Amino acid sequence: MSTIVNILARRKVHYILKDKWASKQRITPFSPLINIGNKVTMATSANDFDLKQGILDIETPRGQHLRGVYKKSFAYHTFRHRIPNILDSLLDSMKKDLSGSTYSQDDITQVLTSIEKLKDSIANNGPLENFQPNEHDNDIELWNKFLSTLPADASFYNICWLYAECYLYRRVYSYFRSSNSLREYDYFSPQKMHALHISIGAMVELIRNTKTLGNNFESFSHMLKLNLWGNKCDLSLSTGQDVKPLDNLNKLVDSLNGNILTDDCVHIWNCIQSGMAQQQKTQKRCVDFVCDNAGFELFTDLLLGKYLIEHNLTDMVRFHVKTMPWFVSDTTPPDVQNALKYMENHATADLSDFGKQCLGYFNNGIFEIEARESFWTTPYEFYRMNDIAPGLYQLLSTSLLIIFKGDLNYRKLLGDFNWDPTENFQKCLRGFNPSNLCTLRTVKADLICGLKPGLAEELTSKTNDWMLTGEYAVIQFAKGAKEN
């Protein structure tokens, strides 16, 4: 377990909308008092901020949504420390990268001022405000409709972490979209490209060492786990600092099996194998990736997708990416294009050939970038998808397998809810089952499910922060509605 480099953790949180599921659970996320057993607990910290904001000096209680109001939660750490650091890093990056550029100096100054004001708002637990409509973005109405469902005093700490963190990144995006010259500027791109450049050695190693893998369970499982551990490279987790992939990852994969807390590789393999019958019925098989990070993780997504195609395990692969800069390192269409161009033109023949092969797949429709859907950059949990984005739900229902990558997608699958760690994964999806799906996630947020009884307690006895380091992982599978 010491093999994996511990890195800080990524988290995201939700306030509970007034829906049937929430009312059944009798969740009261805005109560200033929290019942734990027979005791009522209130914030005890002498810190002025904590006292003023009603911060509770406890961990997130079981059966509650993750929120910054719980001081011993990653949500609290996120808004007190991680987010300010990320915004500081963004400010520094903009000042460096845009110095002497052709962008309007007035626009640059206005955006920098707005980000500074946002930092102050977070530091004072400010409110979540509506977005101003514009002619460029089609998600404003959806966002404002969502915000209207929140209490009038909704703020960064007192609503669900997922909701607040998604709002923050959408708010940053709004500053650029309201300018003229910076409207299309990806302010996280320099960090993402740098993350790609420092991963070249690991990328070449994997290309060379996976060429001889065959069409069998052992090879398939190996490729899944390479893709899984690629998820460690997360710039929002490291607050924008360098995160290099593990050295000799291809050789290390088997030694990391003890760190995979739930391993459903065999169920995923059986699901893929069932696609052979679908092929015989002349139905086109498709595997969907709901992507997470650009850079090295995107490379491992492409590597796994190429393996699936070459071994006739699917007919096409769709990569769902974000429509805007998101959570620092999340993949956007230009990230895919930049990575392909960089690999194609690289001096290393293996990497150049890989880039050309992937580009050919995209040109021939074997690989597809799916970036039309703004649902991925809303605060909604996935069990709401069929109501909020029925077209996307229908598209996913045609998939042989949907692969959800990383921590943010996992949080949206589970709804940023502190489930019992032994709760069944399928139950935690709350009816979200457009098709067979799996999640490949290195654990970097304090929520989890599907563990064996006693395992969470055993890990906690060793270290309290085991859910925050990315040292552990889960590979979890759930059958789709048509398979049940």
Image (cartoon, rainbow, N blue to C red):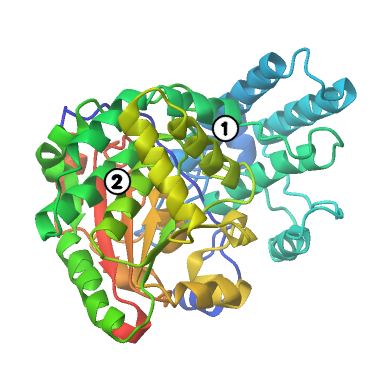
The residue nearer to you, when weighing 262 against 210, is: 210
The residue nearer to you, when weighing 127 against 140, is: 140
- Residue 349 in sight from this viewpoint: yes
Label 1 belongs to which residue? 83
Q: Percent x, y for residue 401?
A: 34, 68
Q: Percent x, y for residue 364?
A: 48, 59
Quadrant in which the N terminus appears: top left
Quadrant in which the C terminus appears: bottom left
Query: Left or right: 328 with respect to 274?
Result: right
Label 2 belongs to which residue? 227
Give the residue type at disc 1.
Answer: Ile
Q: Are marks 1 and 2 in contact (CB under 8 Å)?
A: no
Mark 1, other Cα within 10 Å: few <14 / some 14–19 / many ≥20:
many
Residue appearing at x 46%, y 46% in the figure: 359
Q: Percent x, y for residue 288?
A: 41, 63
Relative to 219, is 386 above or below? below
Q: Percent x, y for residue 126?
A: 72, 40
Res 61 quadrant in image: bottom left
